[in-house]
Image (spheres, rainbow, N blue to C red):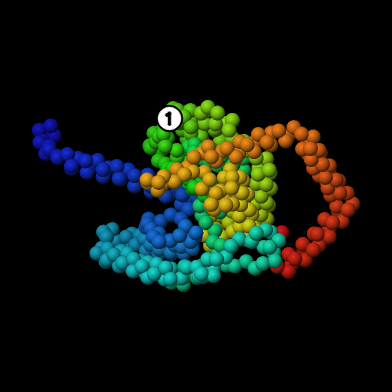
Amino acid sequence: ILSTISVPTVDRPMRLRRRQNLRFEALAREAYETMKENDRAGSICVVQKCYTLIGCQPDEHVLLLGPLQQLINSERKEILLFRRSRAEKSQKKRAKSTTTVDEERRLDWELKTRRRAIMRVMHEKLRLTTRQALVTHPRNQLESLKGRWHYFETTVYEIPSCEFIRLPLPLPRIGREWALSQFLLDIGPDSLVLCLKLMLLERSILVLGDNLSCVSTTACALIELLKPFEWASTFMPVLPPRMLDFINSPVPFIAGVSVRDVYAVEKDRRVLEAMSHGMSLLNLKTKTVHITAEKDVSKMISLDPYLLEKLKFLRCRLQSYLRENPLSALRNFNVFLKSGFSPQESLTLHSVTQAIEQHFSHFCGDLTKNGKAWKRYGTIDMNSNEFIYNPKWFLNPMETDQAFQEAMAHTQLFSSFVHEKRQDQMEIQEMMEGELGHYIANWIYGKWKQRRAQYRFDI
């Protein structure tokens, strides 16, 4: 009988529309499964509603995300209570009554109306004043003890079960401070500097991991830490695994891929082929960086020992803060949204970004110090009035200095200078380990303890 039924012909637009609907349904199912996994992790703001932030500066995103999380939690709680009460009623009556449908519509209308009103209040309250926007980080630890820390404090009472929000100024950025803290604590400074130097050479980097939030935050941290430069090519913090063919693109990119089987992707033919043509791989699960097999790239990259030593010291300081306070914002995104980092944590992360930026500024010659230095490294086309940059003009002074420095390094003058520095360091080390060093350390510790009691700061 089924074989004799005539099937009506479907035109091509209709078939295409059905195919698109199936694809959209698959994408929605995949997104929902990801939402459930993130919800179980407890570290991501997940909701079935979508909020688009328009006209908000990236520096002020953290102002909105905390109250939005509170609003989402209150709506989810109210919907959950409604569904429980409806389930209790359905046990008594098998068929769904029209009253229940009306109640659902009424609840949905009330939530929408209240949400709009709350969003208007948030738009008015969650703004920095001109004075608050001008607050900057202290230049060093001593200045932070002498000075007074400023905070942005508010409570959106229109949100049911609202919580007090207190964020330090300047406001922490999710893509910079939060992402940097996770990268530094989980991966380490060696891989961080190595990836940044690969980006300076405009080499592609694929961030691979089994946690979506870790992959995206790591990719954002790489972009933010490239200052004083800006990544001018493709940036995709989350690349779907089915689009892995993109990595063979000739355009430099920074992309993140989150999959369960990390090792299968690492050995994928497309990944191996891309690594032979300029792409490097950052594996978050094994915490390793696989440098591209492109010729001479690995020879050009060297890690500055002074920078690494400083970053490792600052990382140890962050780890000590985390040991003292296991509930710190360094490991809890919800705490970060409510109160941000502590003054000490914020200052340490700021010192990390400063150290990296100062190191990269050395590659710019005098461009970062002199605003008119660019004139020496190019000409202006009289016809098009466009500036034409000439790399040779920028490299010639460096080549001359390199030749001079190479000749000076073989002189007795420079050899004596190195021995002097060694002798001075040995005398300082001997003094620090001797009786005088212990006396100075005890005296400084006593004074520091008095200051800590006065300003109520933890060392």
Q: Quadrant of the C terminus?
A: bottom right
- Can residue 382 be seen from the camera position used here? yes
Q: Nearer the viewer, residue 12 or 127?
A: 127
Q: Is residue 170 above or below residue 279?
A: below
Q: Classify residue 89 as left or right of residue 288.
A: left
Q: Where residue 330 appears, x then y in whole percent?
A: 59, 53
Q: Position of residue 347 (x, y in %)?
A: 63, 57
What amino acid type should be assigned to the residue bearing mark 1? Arg
Q: Residue 265: horizontal and vertical position, in percent?
A: 46, 33
- For the image shown, how many numbered marks are present on the structure? 1
Of 201 and 438, nearer the camera is 201
Figure check: 291 above or below 120: above
Query: Who's the residue at 12% across and 32% down the image?
Result: 3
Looking at the rendered structure, the secondary structure element under dot 1 is helix
Q: Say which residue appears at 86% left-offset and 53% top-offset.
A: 438
Extreme residue toward the front, this view: 382
**Any part of residue 84 in sight:** no
Bin the neighbour count of mark 1 within 10 Å (Cα to Cα): few under 14, some 14-19, many 20 and up: some
Q: Is residue 187 left or right of residue 389?
A: right
Residue in view at x 66 percent, y 43 percent: 308
Relative to the observer, which residue lies in front, 258 or 92? 258
Question: Does residue 437 appear left or right of residue 83 in this picture?
Answer: right
Residue shown at 61%/55% (left/top)? 350
Q: Quadrant of the N terminus?
A: top left
Q: Position of residue 388 (x, y in %)?
A: 45, 43
Q: Quadrant of residue 297?
A: top right
The quarter of the picture where residue 236 lies is top left
In the picture of the structure, the residue carrying the numbered disc 1 is: 270
Residue 407 vs residue 115, the one in the foreground:
407
Question: Where, by quadrant of the figure, is residue 191 drawn?
Answer: top right
